[in-house]
Image (cartoon, rainbow, N blue to C red):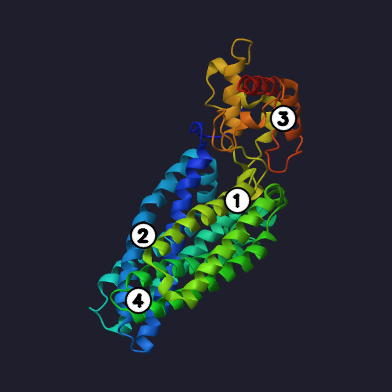
């Protein structure tokens, strides 16, 4: 008997597994991106304070460091394991693929991360207790460790979009997997956003010290405005380069929502350009309330749509363009000894080859057709779609509202023939298509 996969199905009602993973990931990315940008800013400020003997900068740096410690490292350390938990539940085959390709890369990244965690405590609590030159060297190594963490993680995340070359499939090499054509534009895109975030966070701290030192507050507000605007321009520039390095399926998804995405980005760019200009030209107008609100604006209207778009553009794959989002291996990878699972599924059906399907559903009958259809839909579709009518994440039943059973079967056959580049090319026996279609029709209002 042929079997596929090694893990049972995880489904979170109404939201779907990917949505839960995305919420955790977005919060973590806000914290982690702030930490890397702040590490570079911290090194810049420490350099300036040391070279120009600006002792007045150290109290600001300490407040910034405390904010960084709590906001980035406490929140990041909580949501980081949260990503591992939700990603492992929602996409165990995908996580397995990443670990098998990048176990030593990840191990190296964890070394950098441990240094970061120790470093941020040392930077904050040793300030004023060790000589400024030693503290400056510590800030440099902290910044290098933060950028090193970013570079290693970006190589892994870029592989999730695609290796960028067919060489990986033949060799299975970690370097061929890591150095894809979109790795470096992706990295510089993230660095730009991190620089911008360091300035945005810096504006919160700069405005908060206005009562203590108004002239320093104004000076730092102007500097943070310039830094944030510079980061924003880098982000926009490398975003355009990054988009040019993506595979065809990514562009197919992007074209569906292109007008909405472009409009969102234009509005966001205008809002934050005006905000940064105000910080540069009228620094006294920036107050802690406004600065804190702008962090929320970036999270809700900038980071969340951006991460959602990136996750969507990767479809139908979850990793390396050989593992579908529904955990099915879609192509041979000789370099890893991996065989495509599509032929055996097309021949025997999902119910027969999935080891976690109950025995009473292995064979479709009139009495279990709806139950079998529900299970098949969850296995094949629920990582990208919620199945309830009131589902929040691409509700499948709502999208097929008004389509009869024959119409749904026609869509499923077209999908199996590769008509939709952002959907898995998954061919099933006709009785399984029939069960899925009957189940989806039964979910309509």
In the rendered image, which residue does mark 3 sit on? 412
Mark toward the start of the polypeptide (1 vs 2): 2
| Marks 2,4: beta carbons within 8 A | no
Query: Residue 432 at x, y = what percent?
Result: 67, 22
Q: Position of residue 110 (x, y in %)?
A: 41, 59
> According to the image, label 2 marks what residue?
71
Residue at image mark 4: 138
Q: Which residue is mark 1?
A: 309
The image quarter in which residue 406 lies:
top right
Image point (73%, 40%), residue name: 420
Out of 299 and 410, give the one closest to the viewer.
299
The x, y position of residue 291, in whole percent, is: 42, 64
* Labels 3 and 4 touching (C-beta < 8 A): no
Tell us which disc is closer to us: 3 or 1.
1
Q: On the picture, is 142 further left or further right than 381? A: left
Callout 3: SS: helix
Nearest to the eye among marks 1 and 4: give it.
1
Q: Which residue occupies 45% across, 56% down?
A: 296
The answer, for residue 107, to whether it is visible in the render is no
The Cα–Cα distance between marks 3 and 1, rounded to whole angstroms, is 24 Å
Position of residue 262 relative to residue 235, above or below, is above
Looking at the image, tell me whether mark 3 or mark 1 is earlier in sequence order: 1
How far apart marks 2 and 4 lie (CA) works out to 21 Å
Q: Is residue 341 above or below residue 150?
A: above
Q: Residues within 10 Å of mark 4 (few under 14, many from 20)?
A: some
Q: Secondary structure at mark 1?
A: helix
Residue visible at 33% across and 63% down? 69
Task: Tell me whether circle 1 and circle 2 mark residues in contact (CB < 8 Å).
Answer: no
């Amino acid at each position: 008997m042929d079997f596929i996969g090694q893990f049972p199905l995880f489904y979170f009602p109404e939201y779907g597994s990917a949505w839960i993973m995305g919420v955790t990931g977005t919060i973590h990315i806000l914290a982690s991106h702030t930490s890397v940008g702040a590490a570079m800013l911290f090194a810049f400020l420490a350099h300036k304070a040391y070279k120009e003997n600006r002792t007045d900068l150290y109290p600001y740096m300490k407040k910034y460091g405390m904010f960084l410690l709590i906001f980035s490292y406490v929140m990041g350390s909580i949501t980081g394991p949260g990503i591992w938990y939700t990603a492992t539940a929602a996409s165990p085959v995908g996580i397995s693929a990443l670990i098998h390709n990048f176990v030593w890369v990840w191990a190296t990244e964890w070394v950098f991360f441990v240094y970061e965690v120790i470093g941020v405590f040392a930077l904050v609590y040793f300030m004023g207790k060790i000589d400024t030159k030693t503290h400056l060297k510590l800030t440099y190594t902290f910044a290098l460790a933060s950028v090193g963490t970013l570079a290693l993680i970006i190589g892994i995340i870029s592989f999730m979009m695609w290796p960028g070359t067919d060489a990986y499939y033949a060799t299975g090499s970690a370097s061929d997997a890591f150095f894809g054509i979109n790795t470096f534009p992706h990295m510089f895109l993230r660095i730009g956003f991190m620089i911008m975030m360091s300035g945005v966070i810096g504006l919160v701290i700069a405005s908060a010290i206005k009562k203590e030192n108004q002239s320093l507050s104004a000076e730092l507000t102007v500097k943070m405005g310039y830094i944030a605007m510079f980061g924003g321009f880098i982000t926009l520039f490398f975003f355009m380069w990054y988009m040019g390095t993506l595979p065809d399926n990514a562009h197919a998804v992007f074209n569906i929502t292109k007008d909405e995405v472009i409009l969102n980005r234009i509005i966001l760019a205008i809002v934050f350009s005006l905000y940064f200009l105000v910080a540069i030209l009228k620094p006294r107008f920036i107050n802690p309330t406004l600065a804190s609100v702008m962090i929320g604006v970036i999270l809700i209207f900038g980071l969340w749509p951006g991460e959602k778009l990136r996750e969507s553009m990767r479809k139908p794959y979850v990793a390396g363009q050989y593992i579908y989002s529904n955990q099915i291996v879609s192509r041979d990878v000789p370099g890893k000894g991996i065989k495509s699972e599509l032929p055996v599924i097309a021949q025997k059906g999902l119910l027969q080859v999935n080891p976690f399907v109950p025995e009473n559903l292995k064979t479709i009958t009139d009495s279990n057709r709806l139950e079998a259809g529900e299970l098949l839909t969850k296995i094949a579709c629920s990582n990208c779609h919620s199945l309830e009518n009131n589902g929040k994440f691409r509700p499948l039943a709502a999208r097929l509202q008004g389509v009869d059973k024959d119409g749904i079967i026609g869509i499923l056959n077209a999908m199996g023939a590769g008509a939709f580049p952002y959907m898995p090319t998954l061919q099933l026996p006709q009785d399984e298509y029939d069960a899925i279609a009957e189940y989806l029709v039964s979910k309509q209002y």
